[in-house]
Image: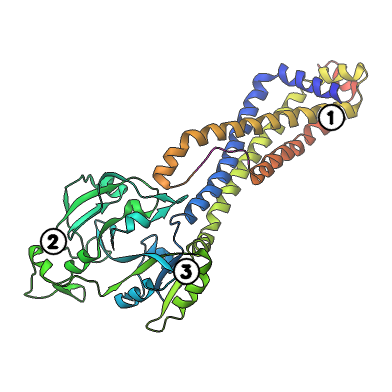
Amino acid sequence: MRAILRLAALSAWSRRLTLGLTLIAIALATTLLLAVERVRVDARQSFTQSVSGVDLVVGARTGSVQLMLYAVFHAGAASNNIRWDSYQALTQHPAVDWSVPLSLGDSHRGFPVLGTEADYFRHFRYGDHEALRFTTGKPFAGVFETVLGSEVAQQLGYALDGAITLSHGLNELGPEHGDKPFRITGILAPTGTPVDRTIHVSLESITALHLDWVGGTPMPGLVIPAEYVAKFDLKPKEITAALLGLKQRSDVFRMQRFINDFRAEPLLGVLPGVALDELWQTVGMIERTLLAISALVVLVGLAGLAATLLAGLNERRRELAILRALGAGPGQIFLMLIAEGVLITTLGALLGFILLSLGSLLAAPWLLERFGVVLGGRWPSREELALIGMVITTGLVASLAPGWRAWRMSLADGLTPRL
């Protein structure tokens, strides 16, 4: 067997240019397959870590997916709000360690506005419990101050101490609160999460914006200038959702039952990880489609290997006939062709993994900054090893046809001159 493998390696080396191109094709196809699998796994993990360190997300009674969409991803609208006194009652529960209120409903040039408290920047976590960092500036401290996500500042060209005005509602062309501009006090570092596309203001700012509004429209004949809003009680009457951190993780189900059975109004408390997993299932078809496309690319590369070996048999008839004349049996010729195919496939798969590892190291910072996908260099996972094994096995199957064809060739077929 060792002699057959050595003979297959020498034979492949003698045709290194042709087989080298096939090897590169297999390596690139394997890289694509493994990259899709790795990005799929890491993207799912990063997706489920869009918010971390939060034990419960609380909102009005609705579906868990819908609650996560507007509370974490700031997409869509809440079916109802939470009264401020209900929120206060939740924060006073003995199991609650910290809480962050969230108020949504306004926007700025298509970007959502989030009303919250300064504690948001201290407690909010993403990824592997990463804290929010400021590229420049600091959290808002008063009314009509705002902190921008990195994508907002980059796309709109905003800088520290600049001024912006907000629009009522989520529609980009909604009525504008033009008489109450906000000063930019800070810009957050990129996170690859919905935070990057969010404009953060205080809850008091949300109330101040709507002092002279009712039912989503300005009150006729009533204008309250920005300099006079401090004379009013700016405590919010309701919020959209809330993030809760508990003193002990073991209390999470007890606290969830307390929220779901809350008597003052119908509320819903969800575990972020469970809800995000459920949300990911809705886009699961996309990841399976990408994986299937990558598998087809690998099959194309292996079909090219089979075609190359088959095409080369006509040129190798005399070589194979000489091997038969020296005592090699049909089975040994068959095994030599199989060994060539498996050798090329194995080298291509290994080269593909090396390319993936190098690409992961180079692309990891960009993926984290742009998409929030934590793509780390690591040893191949069980799933990746299974895919590499499938590539090699498929290469073995693809080599059967050339091996069977070589086995059928007779000694006379190789030695008889053709006219």
Per the image, label 2 sits on a secondary structure element best described as loop
In this rendering, position of residue 221 left or right of residue 43: left
In the foreground, 296 or 378: 378
Q: CA distance from mark 3 to mark 1?
A: 59 Å
Per the image, label 3 sits on a secondary structure element best described as strand
- The three-letter amino acid code for the residue at tag 3 is Val
Between disc 3 and disc 2, the foreground one is 3
Residue tagged by mark 2? Answer: 180
Q: Is residue 48 magenta?
A: no
Residue tagged by mark 3? Answer: 270
Q: Is residue 346 above or below residue 133?
A: above
Q: Which residues are magenta?
A: 375-380
Residue tagged by mark 1? Answer: 335
Q: Is residue 29 above or below residue 318?
A: below
Image position, residue 401 (x, y; %): 78, 35
How packed is label 2: few (under 14 Cα within 10 Å), some, or many (20 or more)?
many
The C terminus lies in which quarter of the figure? Answer: top right
Q: CA distance from mark 2 to mark 1?
A: 80 Å
Q: Is residue 106 above or below residue 387?
A: below
Residue at position x 8%, y 74% in the image:
222
Q: Earlier in the sequence, mark 2 or mark 1?
A: 2
